[in-house]
Amino acid sequence: MAKKNKNQMVASEELVSNAPLKDADLSSKNVSAKAKDSKEFKNKKDKKQSPGARIRKAFKEMFSELKKVNWPTAKKTASAFGIVIVVVLFFLVIISAFDYGIMQLIKLLMDASVGS
């Protein structure tokens, strides 16, 4: 029989943690009450602000988020723009070819129906 390493587990062993949950209150009543209280607090706080203050706050948050954006370099932007142009031109040629072919087929059918 192979010797069992102390870090290996046998399939029949269960993982059990004896660590206590610190300040854990898992009852649904308390969770919903806390969420309700925080929503009411936020609503009361927002109601006290003037419309101008809320707009200023929204713009301030928007600009702070825009500062966190990883903006591409000019070289990456030009490269992406070039790829877009090539793909658009490719599909322009494909769609134009189908359009021309369908137009020629319609002309052929119209000439055949008029000639009969």
Image (cartoon, helix red, strand yellow):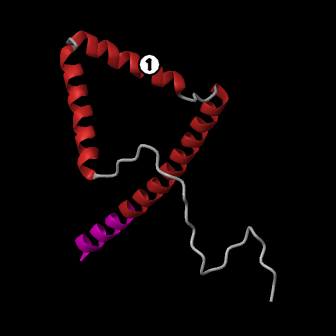
Left or right: 7, with 16 as reference point: right
> In front: 62, or 104?
62
Q: Quadrant of the C terminus?
A: bottom left
Left or right: 49, with 69 as reference point: left
Which is the main secondary structure of the residues drawn in magenta? helix
Q: Position of residue 21 (x, y in %)?
A: 46, 50
Query: Which residue is at 26% across, 45% downward?
Result: 30
Query: Which residue is at 67% across, 29% downward?
Result: 75
Left or right: 66, with 38 as reference point: right
Query: Which residue is at 19% across, 15% downward?
Result: 48
Q: Secondary structure at mark 1?
A: helix
Q: Quadrant of the N terminus?
A: bottom right
Image: magenta residue range: 104-116
Is 101 situated above or below 10? Answer: above
Disc 1: CA contacts within 10 A as few (<14), some (14-19) or many (>=20): few
Is 79 situated above or below 28? Answer: above
Query: Residue tagged by mark 1?
Result: 63
Left or right: 56, with 51 as reference point: right
* Residue 106 shown in magenta: yes
Q: Position of residue 38 (x, y in %)?
A: 27, 32
> In front: 98, or 107?
98
Amino acid at circle 1? Phe
